[in-house]
Amino acid sequence: MPGLLAAGSYDGSVGLYGDLGREPMAVMHGHRGGVTQVLFSRDGNFLYSGARKDPTIYCWDVRNTAGAVYSMHRCVTSTNQRIAFDIDPSNRHLATGGEDGQVWVFDLASGSKVASFQAAQDTVNGFSFHPCLPLAATSSGNRRFHLPALTPGSSPEVGSVSPEAPSVSPETGVLPRESASLSGAGIVTSVHDVSTPLHKFNNCLAMWQFQCKWA
């Protein structure tokens, strides 16, 4: 909304500020951890907020901040990473990653989950819609360290820690992946299974193409 600024805080609150004032016009509470992202809807009437180690994304009506309109839940409970979310250009859906490697898609009219697909084996920490094309980008990965087993009488060596290798199916060498199929004005309609070496999508940026046109 023009003339309105939103800011999150380490105490889990979200403040709304006018462009001419230094004191908050409204303060919303509800998050467990420090707020890591705030995002206005395309029309500016609603604000969405997420926090660290908090599975809840809240929807706030900036015209009436007495309480959250609804909440959306994702798999975020233990990682210290910031898990980003984004709103599609049609202002109808919000998508976010999670610790389970899934991308979750929510209907902004009701806050209900309408689809999900497996984007990585590890944490999906970033998600962003293209502003005009039916494309999206995800980032995934986590810092994991494998400590070698010590035999009796041995001692760990400095610098011997190495990143943990992703587990892969011994039968096929691949992991199942689901890709979302979208049609119409950004409406998620189905999810179908495909087979791909999913471990290749860890610790990287991946691009996704949807079968739709943004209204």
Image: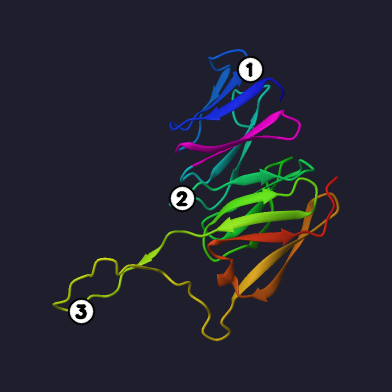
Q: Which residues are magenta?
A: 33-51
Which is nearer the N-term, disc 3 or disc 1? 1
Q: Position of residue 44 (x, y in %)?
A: 72, 29
Left or right of 100 in this view: 206: right
Which is nearer the N-term, disc 2 or disc 3? 2
Q: Position of residue 63 (x, y in %)?
A: 68, 22
Residue 77: which disc? 2
Q: Amino acid at mark 2?
A: Thr
Residue 151: which disc? 3
Q: Amino acid at mark 3?
A: Thr
Q: Position of residue 188 (x, y in %)?
A: 77, 55
- Provide the secondary structure element on which disc 1 rests: loop
Left or right of 6 in this view: 82: left
The answer for how far apart the CA atoms under marks 3 and 1 are is 64 Å
- The residue at which mark 1 appears reads as 19
Q: Residue at x 43, y 52 (%)?
A: 78
